[in-house]
């Protein structure tokens, strides 16, 4: 291998991916027994595309993520009673507070959505990336066809590289 000289360095160009070249896959994450914050960090990384070598912060590089068994997510410490979620109705005196235990009873999928939302950067891509997150309380989800198609593409690509 030759060493890089100033002449060759001047000719090199930085490659920037175009929107059509981005490969979107479907990831399925099982939340059973996983700690809420660690799960949210992992999912946020998948949504942003940080697990890919072609990661670029200004493009939507991430995958679609399906989280199943949201009702079986675990929290550490006393958070089940102490953690409080706030929202406002828009009217005077309309601040509503809900504990984590009550939220897990009524909307366990919303707990994971809010945790992941808090771990995504607050920029133009935030809402767009959040649309790629699908959370379900139980083990069943309606995205089986997309997940299987994504796995078939991965298998075909690996076979192509081997030959």
Image (cartoon, rainbow, N blue to C red):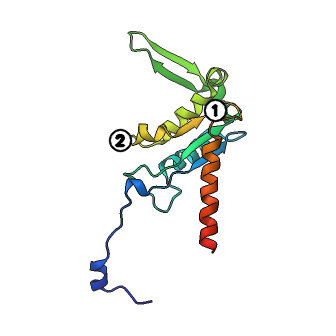
How crowded pointer 1 is (Cα within 10 Å; few <14, some 14-19, many 20+) is rated as: many
Residue 114, image x, y percentages: 53, 32
Looking at the image, is 146 positioned above or below residue 5? above
Q: Quadrant of the N terminus?
A: bottom left
Residue 56 quadrant: bottom left
Residue under the image location 64 percent in, 32 percent down: 136
**Of helix, strand and loop, which one carries label 2?**
loop
Residue to which mark 2 is pinned: 124
Q: Which residue extends farthest bottom?
A: 2
Q: Is residue 56 visible?
A: no
Q: Quadrant of the C terminus?
A: bottom right
Residue 123 quadrant: top left
The reply to whether discs 1 and 2 touch (Cβ–Cβ < 8 Å) is no
How crowded pointer 2 is (Cα within 10 Å; few <14, some 14-19, many 20+) is rated as: few
Specify whether 160 is left or right of 120: right
Q: Is residue 93 visible?
A: yes
Residue 105, image x, y percentages: 67, 21
Specify whether 108 is left or right of 58: right
First along the sequence among labels 1 and 2:
2
Q: Nearer the viewer, residue 37 or 17?
A: 17
Residue under the image location 57 percent in, 43 percent down: 65
Q: Nearer the viewer, residue 84 or 158?
A: 158
Residue 136: give its label.
1
Residue 129, image x, y percentages: 46, 42
Specify whether 7 is left or right of 139: left
**Of helix, strand and loop, which one carries label 1?**
loop
Q: CA distance from mark 1 to mark 2?
A: 26 Å
Q: Nearer the viewer, residue 38 or 54?
A: 54
Single out the mark in the foreground, 1 or 2: 1
Looking at the image, is 99 positioned above or below residue 91? below
């Amino acid at each position: 291998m030759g060493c890089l000289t100033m002449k060759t360095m001047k000719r090199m160009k930085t490659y920037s991916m175009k929107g059509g070249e981005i490969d979107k896959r479907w990831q399925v994450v099982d939340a059973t027994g996983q700690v809420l914050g660690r799960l949210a960090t992992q999912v946020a990384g998948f949504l942003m595309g940080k697990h890919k070598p072609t990661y670029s912060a200004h493009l939507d590089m991430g995958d679609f993520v399906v989280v199943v068994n949201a009702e079986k997510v675990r929290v550490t410490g006393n958070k089940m009673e102490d953690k409080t979620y706030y929202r406002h109705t828009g009217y005077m005196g309309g601040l509503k507070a809900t504990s984590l235990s009550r939220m897990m009873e009524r909307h366990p999928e919303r707990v994971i959505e809010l945790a992941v939302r808090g771990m995504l950067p607050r920029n133009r891509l935030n809402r767009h990336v959040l649309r790629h997150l699908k959370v379900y309380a139980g083990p069943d989800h309606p995205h089986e066809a997309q997940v299987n198609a994504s796995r078939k593409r991965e298998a075909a690509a690996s076979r192509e590289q081997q030959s």
